[in-house]
Image (cartoon, grey):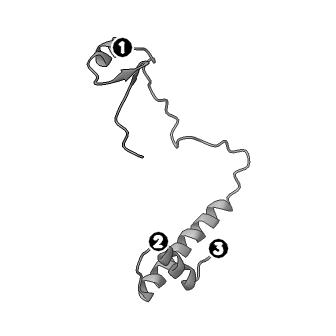
Amino acid sequence: MSLTLDQVRRIARLARIEISTTEAEATRDQLNGIFRFIEQMQAVDTTGVEPMAHAQDVAQRLRPDQVTEQDQREAFQAIAPDVEAGLYLVPKVIE
């Protein structure tokens, strides 16, 4: 896939970017280079290769998912201006 100069200008217009002819030509060349690189990568035979989530085989150390703080809901709702059925009531801001 390669882009034409008109396509680059259209993309710039859609992105609301003002671009000169020289910049459009340079951008077209850069984008076409990226597309050529992508085509080269897609041409590689990856049969039998498992997808990876990360380039290195690392394991993330996670702590156990345990509650570490006391439940202070009642104390917080006791000082709230307006509470109903365990929910904080706030003023309506959108009509």
Disc 1 is placed on an element classified as loop
Name the residue that disc number 1 marks.
68
Disc 2 is placed on an element classified as loop
Residue 1, numbered circle: 3
Residue 15, numbered circle: 2
Q: Is residue 21 above or below residue 15?
A: below
Q: Looking at this rendering, what residue extends furthest in the bottom direction? A: 21
Mark 3 vs 2, N-terminal side:
3
Position of residue 35 in the picture relative to residue 86 (left or right): right
Mark 2 → mark 1, Cα distance in angstroms: 48 Å
| Residue located at (67% from left, 58% from top) | 44
The crowding category of the residue bearing disc 1, from other C-alpha atoms within 10 Å (few below 14, some 14 to 19, many at least 20), is: few
Q: Is residue 25 above or below residue 81?
A: below
User: Is the Cβ of the residue at disc 2 closer than 8 Å to that at disc 1?
Assistant: no
User: Is the Cβ of the residue at disc 3 closer than 8 Å to that at disc 2?
Assistant: no
Mark 3 → mark 2, Cα distance in angstroms: 21 Å
Position of residue 24 measured from the top left corner of the image (x, y, whole percent): 46, 82
The crowding category of the residue bearing disc 3, from other C-alpha atoms within 10 Å (few below 14, some 14 to 19, many at least 20), is: few
The one nearer the camera, 73 or 57, is 73
Position of residue 48 in the picture relative to residue 71 (left or right): right
Disc 3 is placed on an element classified as loop
The one nearer the camera, 47 or 1, is 1
Mark 2 vs 1, N-terminal side:
2
| Residue located at (48% from left, 84% from top) | 25
Q: Amino acid at mark 2?
A: Ala
Position of residue 38 measured from the top left corner of the image (x, y, whole percent): 60, 64
Q: Amino acid at mark 3?
A: Met
Is label 1 or label 3 in front? Answer: 1
The crowding category of the residue bearing disc 2, from other C-alpha atoms within 10 Å (few below 14, some 14 to 19, many at least 20), is: few
Mark 1 → mark 3, Cα distance in angstroms: 55 Å
The answer to which quarter of the image holds residue 84 is top left
Q: Looking at this rendering, what residue extends furthest in the left direction? A: 79
